[in-house]
Amino acid sequence: MAKLYFYYSAMNAGKTTTLLQSAYNYHERGMRTLILKPDVDTREHGEPPSDPAGHLPPQAGEGKKEQPAAAVTTVASRIGLKANARRFSGNEDLFALVEADIAARGALHCVFVDEAQFLTRAQVWQISDVVDRLNIPVLAYGLRTDFRGELFEGSRYLLAWADNLEEIKTICHTGRKATMVVRVDEQGRAVTDGPQVEIGGNERYVSVSRAEFKKISAGQGRIELQQTVLPLGEER
């Protein structure tokens, strides 16, 4: 029986890497997947990947009907994995989108949603219909809270309606588990107002523990933006 899964975390916990690894597990068994990505996340928009290195293999049935170029985007992890994805807008019906994909390209074995915090309430209900009516598992990956510590709309309803919830863990610069996200300015000080959605990567958002979130949001201290990244397997 298919289920709706929500994998949530703070920033830079490896959500997209986990998504791509799970999708690859399906592909190497000859099972077709569909990766969906909200249009609001513009960090990786552009041409789909052409270099096969590190990319998912072609999906069975891909040649039946090409997606419109405007609908194709890329999901990419920080460690270099990439795959094609179907871009969607905030007013698009995701159940209808999945049905159309099946009609055009054949049987579908799993649906993945990247940046699922940007889903609307209606879209979370629609992907639950993919599970309940089409018996296709849906794996959604996203942030739980925004820079103010408030739930995103998509995350709120995924937490309420998903069959399985799983936290993907990452760490704060203090060494504690990071569960919150702060938005910072050029000096590394917390920004506590502004729109909920402001696209950016490490230079704008930092994952921190709840204790550090309280401290930084109160104006006590700042975040060091350029932290040293060590190669895997090496020590300071």
Image (spheres, rainbow, N blue to C red):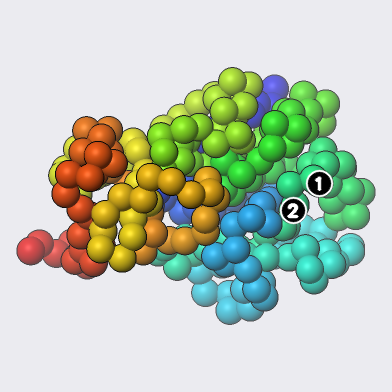
Which element carries disc 2, helix, strand or loop? strand
* Residue displayed at 55% across by 36% down: 152
Mark 2–mark 1 distance (CA, rounded to whole Å): 6 Å
Query: In the displayed image of the protein, which residue is found farthest to the right?
Result: 103
Residue shown at 80% from the left, 71% from the top: 69
Left or right for 141, reference 185: right
Q: Is residue 53 above or below residue 167?
A: below
Residue 88: give its label: 2
Position in image of residue 147 (x %, y %): 41, 43
Instruction: Determine whether, in the image, residue 20 is placed left or right of residue 206.
Output: right
Res. 116 image quadrant: top right
Q: Residue 176 location, x and y as percent? A: 19, 38
Q: Amino acid at mark 1?
A: Glu
Task: Tell me what residue is drawn at x 45 percent, y 67 percent.
Answer: 80
Closest to the observer, 98 or 228 = 228
Residue 100 x, y percent position in the rendering = 89, 48
Which quadrant would residue 184 be assigned to in this image? bottom left
The amino acid beneath tag 2 is Phe
On screen, residue 49 versus residue 236, left or right, reads right
Which residue is tagged 1? 92
Query: Residue 147, labelled with which disc?
Result: none
Q: Is residue 155 visible?
A: yes
Residue 10 showing in the rendered view:
no
* Whether label 2 touches label 1, CB < 8 Å: yes
